Each structure stands twice: as structure tokens, then as C-alpha cells.
């Protein structure tokens, strides 16, 4: 009889893992990660992954000694292959996994107290060193998204043009939106709720099932560790970005996937710039109003 394999699972998918036994179906698989759709009302996605895979918020990590030493990869799983999850276990293919410990998905540290001057310097430093990953149509959509975030107008038109834009399990446009949501959440921006609602409403019909699930996590402020590290570096408040943690954090994020890291970093720049420009505009308006009252 095959030995049950241990899992370190995210608390973000705890209810599916410890709840009643339900069917799961493989919807995507590589040697490092397999995405499984749970047959439940929430449309839960669990990512069964090795320790070398990017730790997405819905991951259940296979923690066997062999896997962590770079040995066996995940079992070969084909799309539409079926299994079960529940009662702290996951069975797929010929392998059964059991949760032995839990971890909390990364969340961005609050950016509300970060000095605006140092955040602006970090954004300027990043913008001058990181190429814009979007094509011309994508840039127009991003510009419209920034305008919506700055002025509090509905983000749905821009969201609709970005969702599903690009190839892969997490298209580039989705990565931009995911990071923007996480960043707005960290900034405590009033635009956070409107953007999250627009993305969650449109994503199921506009992008891949995997990306739609990850966008739901992003709407709650949950993200991969590399994105949390970048926002931590932004919050550090270092006067000279080149001498602080920012270069290493940016490099770590850019190394994620083929284009995902670049899309995520671009989403951070979009959100931070929009929020800070909006704040600057409100300050100018207040000064003009005060000057008018004094003149009167």
C-alpha cells in the first residue's frame, strides 16, 4: 500500500480540505503544480504543488523529503482527471495526500503609513528600470484603469479590456489587475472595493478558471510572497531606493513566471501612482478652495 504523502496547506482553502469529501477535477497541471477544481458552491481551486513552485494563496504544498530535495515531481496528472478532497485529505491519481500542517497566505503590509515622498521615489526608481510589459492596446486599458482609480469612476470598462489579455494560465492583464487589487488593499484606498467587485463579477466569464480563482484571492489582499516582499520594500521608507531592499524584491518578483512577475510589478506601479496622484489632486483642490475663501 502506498504511503500517504504530507501536505502543508494554505488556510485560504481550509474549508475545502477539512470539510466533507467532495469530488475534484484537474484543470491544469505541470511538473511543479496541479490546479484542482473542487465541486462546491464557492468554485474553490486548490493548487497541489511542490516546494519549488510559486506559493500561490490556494496552494497545498507536498512536503516530502524527496520532493524538497529536488527529487520526484508531482504525479503525472491529466486534465479532467478526477479525485476527492475532504476530511483533511486529498486523493488524486494513485496518490493520497494528508494535511499535516497549515500556513497563512502572504498579505501585503499596510502602506498607509509609508512616507509619500519615499514611496514616490521608489516608484520613480522602478519605472526607470523596469520595462512596461503591455502592448499598445493594453497600455490604453491601463491608462483608463488609472483614470478610474484616480477619479472614482466605474472601473468596469478597463477591467473588461484587461481580463484574459495575454496567454497562459494567468494572462498578463490579469496579473496587472491582481497586483493593483492587493496594492489598493494595502493602501486602504476607497477604490479597492470597486475594483474588486468589478473583477470578481467579470472574471469567471473572461479569463481562465485558475486566474479567476487567484484574482478572488487578490481581491482579499492575498498574494504570492514575492509580491508581498515588494510592497514591504515600498513600505520601508528608504530615501535612496537603490540602497534599500527594493532592488532585491523587484528582482525576485520579476523572476516569477514568463511574464507574471512583470505584470504584477506593473500593477503595483499603476495602483500606487493612481492613489498618490489622486491624493495630490485633492490637496491642490483644498488649497485652491482655501485660497478662494481667503480672497473672499
Image: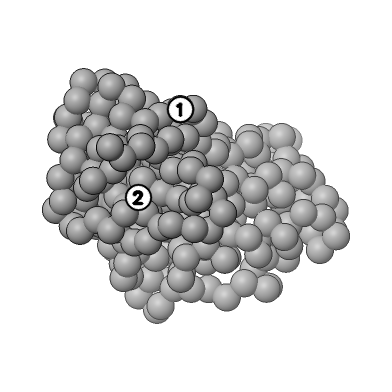
Q: Is residue 15 above or below residue 75?
A: above
* Mark closer to the chain start, 2 or 1: 1
Residue 9 placement (x, y as % from top left): 43, 34
Q: Is residue 113 above or below residue 215?
A: above
Q: Mark 2 touching mark 1, by CB under 8 A?
A: no
Q: Is residue 161 left or right of residue 285?
A: left
- Foreground of the two, 73 or 238: 73
Q: Quadrant of residue 200?
A: top left
Q: Is residue 283 left or right of residue 33?
A: right
Mark identifier at residue 100: 1
Q: Secondary structure at mark 2?
A: loop
Q: Is residue 240 left or right of residue 17?
A: right
Q: Is residue 115 above or below residue 131?
A: above
| Residue at left offset 49%, top offset 58% | 71
Q: What's the image's color scheme?
A: one colour
Q: Which residue is mark 2?
A: 155
Q: Is residue 152 left or right of residue 249?
A: left
| Residue at left offset 68%, top offset 44% | 232
Q: Secondary structure at mark 1?
A: strand
Location of the C terminus (image quadrant): top right
Residue 252 placement (x, y as % from top left): 63, 60
- Foreground of the two, 246 or 138: 246
Residue 79 placement (x, y as % from top left): 18, 57
How far is disc 2 from disc 1 in space, using C-alphas? Answer: 42 Å
Which residue reaches farthest front? 1
Q: Quadrant of residue 196?
A: top left
Residue 196 visible in image: no
Mark identifier at residue 43: none
| Residue at left offset 17%, top offset 29% | 22
Location of the N terminus (image quadrant): top left
- Structural crowding at the residue carrying mark 1, measured as other residues with C-alpha within 10 Å and reported as few (<14), some (14–19) or many (≥20): few
- Foreground of the two, 29 or 218: 29
Amino acid at each position: 500500500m502506498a504511503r500517504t504523502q504530507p501536505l502543508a496547506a494554505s488556510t485560504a482553502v481550509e474549508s475545502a480540505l477539512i470539510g466533507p469529501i467532495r469530488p475534484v477535477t484537474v484543470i491544469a497541471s505541470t511538473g511543479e503544480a496541479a490546479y484542482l477544481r473542487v465541486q462546491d458552491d464557492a468554485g474553490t481551486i486548490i493548487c497541489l504543488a511542490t516546494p519549488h513552485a510559486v506559493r500561490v494563496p490556494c496552494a497545498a504544498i507536498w512536503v516530502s523529503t524527496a520532493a524538497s530535495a529536488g527529487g520526484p515531481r508531482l504525479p503525472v496528472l491529466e486534465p479532467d482527471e478526477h479525485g476527492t478532497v475532504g476530511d483533511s485529505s486529498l486523493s488524486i491519481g494513485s496518490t493520497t495526500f494528508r494535511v499535516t500542517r497549515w500556513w497563512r497566505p502572504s498579505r501585503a503590509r499596510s502602506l498607509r503609513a509609508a512616507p509619500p515622498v519615499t514611496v514616490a521615489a521608489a516608484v520613480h526608481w522602478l519605472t526607470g528600470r523596469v520595462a512596461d510589459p503591455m502592448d499598445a492596446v493594453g497600455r490604453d486599458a491601463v491608462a483608463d484603469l488609472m483614470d478610474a482609480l484616480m477619479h472614482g469612476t466605474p472601473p468596469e470598462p478597463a477591467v473588461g479590456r484587461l481580463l484574459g489579455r495575454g496567454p497562459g494560465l494567468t494572462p498578463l492583464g490579469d496579473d496587472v489587475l491582481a497586483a493593483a487589487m492587493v496594492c489598493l488593499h494595502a493602501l486602504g484606498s476607497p477604490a479597492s472595493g470597486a475594483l474588486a467587485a468589478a473583477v470578481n463579477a467579470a472574471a469567471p466569464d473572461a479569463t481562465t478558471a485558475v486566474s479567476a480563482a487567484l484574482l478572488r484571492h487578490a481581491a482579499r489582499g492575498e498574494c504570492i510572497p514575492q509580491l508581498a516582499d515588494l510592497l514591504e520594500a515600498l513600505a520601508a521608507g528608504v530615501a535612496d531606493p537603490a540602497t534599500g531592499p527594493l532592488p532585491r524584491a523587484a528582482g525576485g518578483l520579476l523572476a516569477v513566471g514568463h511574464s507574471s512577475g512583470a505584470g504584477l510589478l506593473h500593477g503595483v506601479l499603476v495602483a500606487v501612482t493612481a492613489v498618490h496622484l489622486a491624493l495630490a489632486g485633492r490637496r491642490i483642490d483644498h488649497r485652491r478652495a482655501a485660497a478662494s475663501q481667503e480672497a473672499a
